[in-house]
Image (tube, rainbow, N blue to C red):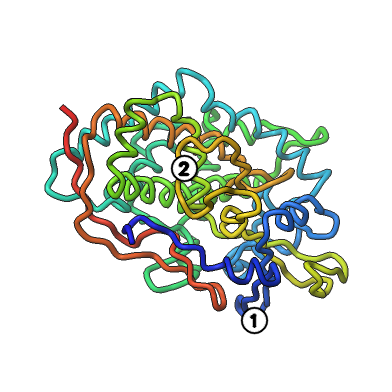
Amino acid sequence: MKKSALSDPFEEARLREGLGYMNDQDDPVVMVLRHKDVRKCAHQWQKFQSGAKPGRIVVPSEVNIRETRQIPFELDPPQHGQYRAVVEKWFKRPLEAVYQEALKVQIDALIDEVIGMEKVEVVSGFSLPLQSRALTLLLNIPYEEAETWIAWGTHVFRSEGEALDGDKAAILYDYIDQQIDQAIANPGDDLYSVLLRSEVEGKKLTREEVKGVMILTFAGGRDTVINAVTNSIAYFADHPAALERLRQEPEIMGKAVEELIRYFAPLTHMGRVATEDIQVCDHAVKADSRISLCWASANRDASVFEKPNEVVLDRKLNPHLSFGFGHHKCLGATHTRQIMKILLRSLTEKVKSINIIDTEENIEEWGKFNRKVGYHSIYVSFNNNS
């Protein structure tokens, strides 16, 4: 098996009953596995809420490490739409040509740094800097600030060997508090300042609401972007013909991005809390208990995707759920798509081939399901295209 391959641990349970089960810190979770059922539950926000206790819809639960509600992620309609409207235009900025040009400069420079090196550790030495530097564009703050975030490591809520780490999370919370203080004292054109000037129903966002948006912005797009970039690098190392195909057929670049995001599903699942006693796939779910919408399983559903366990770079129909579904579809999707699209273009321009030297896989354990989500480390060499 290729080192970049990600198997589907959910297939048997998805076919048999459509559900999986896990215990999350003594708060059980029913995992919804089929594509149609994931979409249905995501759409039924009245029955499966996001606006539960802060941190509870995340899997693993974060109720023990934060009290701040992530906005608009942990809100339900109509509040969700009101707060999302505040930030939606801002998060569409990656569609602007000047944004994409700046992102291309960043990614080209990073590839130039690593080409020709004997070996590069991709997670911390490539994907983390790429994600952090790109985030300065999204927040519209100085490029140099990325070095602070790189120093935090790849996870903002976890330390090595720990599922959750309150002390590590406090670093992010304290940092955001400081940045909000600075934006209050010296307002500018950064996201903090924009949020502080924003209103919902005629009232300015509170400090706690601003903090909630910023925690989501930092945490929601960190591991996921790092996983997407790292897995894609591994894939092109294993499949040099795929990189050559993109060189020869740049018109399929957009489809290739969607397919890589489908196949690798950087986020395994996201939770909801039932508001009433209800049936899910003929299984009784009690009110105030949790389900999870398993994006990774839904993305391999053979009733929806032909050859679901293969990367088909020019896949014609690709209703993948890696960015979620319904009104909670990921705000950062546009930013992530541009990162991936520009990364692939830069790789085709600058890199002839990639060799994998050594890997340590990152295996998530969800009840009886063990899912490879990416790597703790992967060493490669990038070979010059010239």
Residue 373 or residue 208, whichever sits in front = 373
Which quadrant of the structure image shows residue 286? Answer: bottom right
N-term mark: 2 or 1: 1
Q: Which quarter shows the C terminus?
A: top left
Residue 38 or residue 15, whichever sits in front = 15
On screen, residue 61 versus residue 328, left or right, reads: left
The numbered mark at residue 26 is 1
On screen, 264 above or below 256? below
Picture coordinates of residue 61, whole percent (x, y): 61, 68
Picture coordinates of residue 238, whole percent (x, y): 29, 50
On screen, residue 145 versus residue 81, left or right, reads: left
Kind of element beneath mark 1: loop
**Three-letter code, disc 2:** Val
On screen, residue 359 versus residue 300, left or right, reads: left
> Mark 1 Cα within 10 Å, few/some/many (few <14, many 20+)?
few
Residue 176 or residue 338, whichever sits in front = 338
Marks 2/1: CA–CA distance: 40 Å
- Residue at 41% over, 49% down: 226
Outermost residue, top direction?
Answer: 97
The numbered mark at residue 307 is none
> Mark 2 Cα within 10 Å, few/some/many (few <14, many 20+)?
some
Label 2 close to label 1 by CB (< 8 Å): no
Kindly identify which residue carries mark 2. Answer: 312
Q: Which quarter shows the N terminus?
A: bottom left
